[in-house]
Amino acid sequence: LAVRWFTSFADRKGAIYGITPGFSVTLSEQVSAGAGMMILTGHSEDFEFRRDRGLLAFDAVYRVQNYPISYRTTSAGRSDYSGMIANLGLLYREKYFSLAASLKLPATITREWSRTVTIDTAGLLTQSAISGRDELKIPASTSLGILLTPTAEWNVGIDYVMGQLGDAV
Protein backbone atom coordinates (compact mmCIF):
# COMPACT_ATOMS: atom_id res chain seq x y z
CA LEU A 1 0.00 0.00 0.00
CA ALA A 2 1.47 3.37 -1.05
CA VAL A 3 0.40 6.64 0.62
CA ARG A 4 1.36 10.15 -0.50
CA TRP A 5 2.60 12.24 2.42
CA PHE A 6 1.95 15.96 1.97
CA THR A 7 0.93 19.19 3.69
CA SER A 8 -1.65 21.53 2.16
CA PHE A 9 -3.23 24.86 2.97
CA ALA A 10 -5.95 26.88 1.22
CA ASP A 11 -7.24 30.36 2.00
CA ARG A 12 -9.85 32.55 0.32
CA LYS A 13 -10.48 36.05 1.68
CA GLY A 14 -13.16 38.31 0.31
CA ALA A 15 -16.90 38.83 0.19
CA ILE A 16 -19.97 38.71 -1.99
CA TYR A 17 -22.33 41.66 -1.61
CA GLY A 18 -26.00 41.82 -2.54
CA ILE A 19 -27.93 44.94 -3.50
CA THR A 20 -31.70 44.39 -3.75
CA PRO A 21 -33.88 46.96 -5.47
CA GLY A 22 -37.57 46.12 -5.41
CA PHE A 23 -41.05 47.47 -5.79
CA SER A 24 -44.57 46.60 -4.72
CA VAL A 25 -48.04 47.53 -5.83
CA THR A 26 -51.30 47.52 -3.86
CA LEU A 27 -53.86 45.59 -5.90
CA SER A 28 -56.72 46.06 -3.43
CA GLU A 29 -57.17 47.04 0.22
CA GLN A 30 -56.12 43.53 1.24
CA VAL A 31 -53.77 42.34 -1.52
CA SER A 32 -50.27 43.54 -2.48
CA ALA A 33 -47.74 42.11 -4.92
CA GLY A 34 -44.07 42.83 -5.27
CA ALA A 35 -40.82 41.91 -6.96
CA GLY A 36 -37.17 42.29 -6.14
CA MET A 37 -33.86 41.56 -7.81
CA MET A 38 -30.75 40.87 -5.72
CA ILE A 39 -27.65 41.89 -7.69
CA LEU A 40 -24.58 40.00 -6.46
CA THR A 41 -21.03 41.22 -6.87
CA GLY A 42 -17.76 40.62 -5.08
CA HIS A 43 -14.27 39.19 -5.21
CA SER A 44 -11.78 37.17 -3.21
CA GLU A 45 -8.02 36.77 -3.00
CA ASP A 46 -7.22 33.07 -3.31
CA PHE A 47 -4.12 31.21 -2.10
CA GLU A 48 -3.27 27.51 -2.10
CA PHE A 49 -0.08 25.76 -1.03
CA ARG A 50 0.94 22.10 -1.16
CA ARG A 51 4.25 20.51 -0.22
CA ASP A 52 4.75 16.86 -1.07
CA ARG A 53 7.09 15.27 1.47
CA GLY A 54 7.29 11.71 0.28
CA LEU A 55 5.71 8.42 -0.54
CA LEU A 56 5.18 5.99 2.32
CA ALA A 57 5.05 2.33 1.34
CA PHE A 58 3.53 -0.19 3.77
CA ASP A 59 4.23 -3.86 3.13
CA ALA A 60 2.32 -6.96 4.24
CA VAL A 61 3.94 -7.03 7.72
CA TYR A 62 3.39 -3.28 8.33
CA ARG A 63 6.94 -2.17 7.66
CA VAL A 64 7.19 1.35 6.32
CA GLN A 65 9.58 2.65 3.70
CA ASN A 66 9.82 6.36 2.99
CA TYR A 67 10.64 7.56 -0.51
CA PRO A 68 11.35 11.31 -0.16
CA ILE A 69 9.87 13.72 -2.69
CA SER A 70 10.77 17.38 -2.98
CA TYR A 71 7.80 18.99 -4.69
CA ARG A 72 6.00 22.22 -3.79
CA THR A 73 3.03 23.91 -5.49
CA THR A 74 1.87 27.47 -4.78
CA SER A 75 -1.18 29.06 -6.39
CA ALA A 76 -2.20 32.70 -5.89
CA GLY A 77 -4.86 34.72 -7.66
CA ARG A 78 -8.24 36.36 -7.62
CA SER A 79 -11.88 35.33 -8.09
CA ASP A 80 -14.67 37.67 -9.20
CA TYR A 81 -18.28 36.77 -8.40
CA SER A 82 -21.51 37.94 -10.05
CA GLY A 83 -25.14 36.94 -10.31
CA MET A 84 -28.77 37.95 -9.92
CA ILE A 85 -31.55 36.39 -7.86
CA ALA A 86 -35.15 37.42 -8.61
CA ASN A 87 -37.98 37.17 -6.07
CA LEU A 88 -41.75 37.57 -6.56
CA GLY A 89 -44.17 37.97 -3.67
CA LEU A 90 -47.86 38.19 -2.81
CA LEU A 91 -49.41 39.43 0.46
CA TYR A 92 -52.98 39.09 1.74
CA ARG A 93 -53.92 41.15 4.84
CA GLU A 94 -56.81 40.89 7.28
CA LYS A 95 -57.24 42.63 10.64
CA TYR A 96 -55.84 39.79 12.79
CA PHE A 97 -53.70 37.85 10.32
CA SER A 98 -51.75 38.10 7.08
CA LEU A 99 -50.77 35.43 4.56
CA ALA A 100 -47.77 35.69 2.25
CA ALA A 101 -46.20 33.65 -0.52
CA SER A 102 -42.99 34.20 -2.43
CA LEU A 103 -41.21 32.58 -5.34
CA LYS A 104 -37.45 32.80 -5.70
CA LEU A 105 -36.66 32.13 -9.37
CA PRO A 106 -33.78 29.86 -10.48
CA ALA A 107 -30.45 31.70 -10.46
CA THR A 108 -26.81 31.29 -11.44
CA ILE A 109 -23.86 32.65 -9.49
CA THR A 110 -20.72 32.94 -11.62
CA ARG A 111 -17.10 32.83 -10.44
CA GLU A 112 -14.41 33.94 -12.88
CA TRP A 113 -10.93 33.22 -11.59
CA SER A 114 -7.32 33.65 -12.60
CA ARG A 115 -4.18 32.59 -10.79
CA THR A 116 -0.48 32.03 -11.12
CA VAL A 117 0.74 28.54 -10.29
CA THR A 118 4.37 28.02 -9.27
CA ILE A 119 5.79 24.49 -9.11
CA ASP A 120 9.12 23.89 -7.36
CA THR A 121 10.63 20.48 -8.08
CA ALA A 122 13.91 20.22 -6.17
CA GLY A 123 14.85 23.81 -7.00
CA LEU A 124 13.58 23.81 -10.60
CA LEU A 125 10.82 26.44 -10.81
CA THR A 126 8.05 26.49 -13.41
CA GLN A 127 5.34 29.11 -13.45
CA SER A 128 2.09 29.29 -15.41
CA ALA A 129 -1.00 31.46 -15.51
CA ILE A 130 -4.39 29.75 -15.59
CA SER A 131 -7.95 31.02 -15.55
CA GLY A 132 -11.45 29.66 -15.69
CA ARG A 133 -15.11 30.09 -14.99
CA ASP A 134 -17.38 28.21 -12.59
CA GLU A 135 -21.15 28.44 -12.30
CA LEU A 136 -23.38 27.55 -9.35
CA LYS A 137 -26.96 26.94 -10.50
CA ILE A 138 -29.51 27.43 -7.71
CA PRO A 139 -33.00 25.94 -8.22
CA ALA A 140 -36.24 27.82 -7.62
CA SER A 141 -37.73 27.88 -4.13
CA THR A 142 -41.01 28.99 -2.61
CA SER A 143 -42.02 30.17 0.82
CA LEU A 144 -45.32 30.52 2.62
CA GLY A 145 -45.89 32.59 5.71
CA ILE A 146 -48.55 33.60 8.18
CA LEU A 147 -48.53 36.52 10.59
CA LEU A 148 -50.98 36.51 13.50
CA THR A 149 -51.76 39.88 15.10
CA PRO A 150 -53.85 39.21 18.23
CA THR A 151 -53.24 42.75 19.59
CA ALA A 152 -51.59 45.92 18.35
CA GLU A 153 -48.54 45.12 20.53
CA TRP A 154 -48.07 41.44 19.61
CA ASN A 155 -47.23 39.72 16.32
CA VAL A 156 -46.41 36.04 15.82
CA GLY A 157 -45.07 34.93 12.47
CA ILE A 158 -44.22 31.59 10.88
CA ASP A 159 -42.43 31.16 7.57
CA TYR A 160 -41.88 27.86 5.73
CA VAL A 161 -39.36 27.67 2.88
CA MET A 162 -39.59 24.89 0.29
CA GLY A 163 -36.52 24.51 -1.86
CA GLN A 164 -34.10 21.83 -2.94
CA LEU A 165 -30.69 23.41 -2.32
CA GLY A 166 -29.28 19.89 -2.57
CA ASP A 167 -30.04 20.17 -6.31
CA ALA A 168 -27.71 23.16 -6.73
CA VAL A 169 -24.92 22.35 -9.18
Image (cartoon, rainbow, N blue to C red):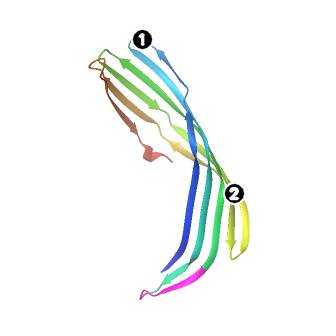
Packing grade of label 2 (10 A; few <14, some 14-19, many >=20) is few
Q: Nearer the viewer, residue 86 or 116?
A: 116
Q: Is residue 2 above or below residue 118?
A: below
Residue at point 68%, 77% (across, down) = 122
Q: Is residue 160 magenta?
A: no
Q: Are marks 1 and 2 in contact (CB under 8 Å)?
A: no
Q: Secondary structure at mark 1?
A: loop
Q: Which residue bears the numbered disc 2?
A: 130
Q: Is residue 66 magenta?
A: yes
Q: Is residue 143 above or below residue 63?
A: above
Question: Disc 2 residue type?
Answer: Ile
Relative to 15, 61 lies left or right: left
Residue 52 percent across, percent down from the top left: 59, 73
Q: Secondary structure at mark 2?
A: strand
Residue 5 percent across, percent down from the top left: 53, 75
Residue at point 45%, 14% (across, down) = 26
Q: Gap between marks 1 and 2, in whole Å?
A: 56 Å
Q: Which residues are magenta?
A: 60-68
Residue 82 percent across, percent down from the top left: 61, 40
Q: Quadrant of residue 81?
A: top right
Relative to 151, 86 lies left or right: right
